[in-house]
Image (spheres, helix red, strand yellow):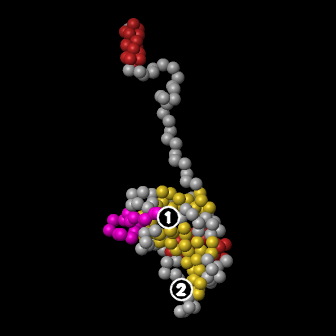
Amino acid sequence: MKRALLISCSVFLAASAAIGCKSTGAPTNSNTISTPTPAPAAPVVKVNWSLTEPKVNIMDGTSIQFINSNDPIYFHLCFQSKGTCSVPIDIQTPKGCYIENNVQGWSTRRSVRIKWDDEKAQAQQWSIDDSHTALIPPNSTAFINELKMHKKFSIELGCASYDSAVMTLDIAGLPEAMATLSVKH
């Protein structure tokens, strides 16, 4: 019985050697199972907020002022002394990006995912502006309030209907920028 087992093992080892299998010794790197390495997190880009000079509409005396941000995407927040701006906030994409819709049945809607600080990501449908270079959140007032309350904002979007990239922005400092507005809102 021992002899039959020895012959069986020898045949197995010979067959393994013939097809290139290693059956003895410590596992090598080529035989170990590796755990996939997660993709590196996107770098967090610091947003620098800047204010425009207020402008007065000569027809009704309404003052209007904007708070803008820097690359890679541009926040444009609008404040006016009487009522609200027609578009209180939009997010402009980098130059050369023509935003395509990705919502069935809508030519001016884009599904995006956003995330505040370390909260759970949420899917939303945003409007695409007429030039297809900016997105407008569904509830501008609520979105501006969220910007004021959080330190980090991530958005997953792309230009073409099939792509999406994640940009994470350090948005701290907006409440301080808003405190320096000349236009009282």
Query: Residue at horizontal 36%, vertical 69%?
Result: 107
- In the rendered view, does 118 fall on the left or right side of 86? right
The segment highlighted magenta reads 94-110
- The span from disc 2 to disc 1 (Cα, nearest Å) is 31 Å
Q: Residue at x 60, y 71 (%)?
A: 148
Q: Residue at x 55, y 73 (%)?
A: 76
* Above or below for 40 versus 170: above
If the image is split into quadrants, where does the N terminus sit? top left
Query: Relative to 47, is 133 on the left or the right?
Result: left
Q: Residue at x 51, y 29 (%)?
A: 29
Mark 2 or mark 1, earlier in chain: 2
For residue 22, what is the image quadrant? top left
Res 64 quadrant in image: bottom right
Q: Is residue 5 magenta?
A: no
- Numbered circle sitting on residue 110: none
List the residue tagged with mark 2. 83
Which secondary structure class fits the magenta region best? loop
Q: Amino acid at mark 1?
A: Lys
Q: Nearer the viewer, mark 2 or mark 1?
A: 1
Residue 117: give x, y in percent of width and height.
58, 61
Residue 172 vertical placement versus 36 (above, below): below
Q: Which mark is residue 95?
A: 1
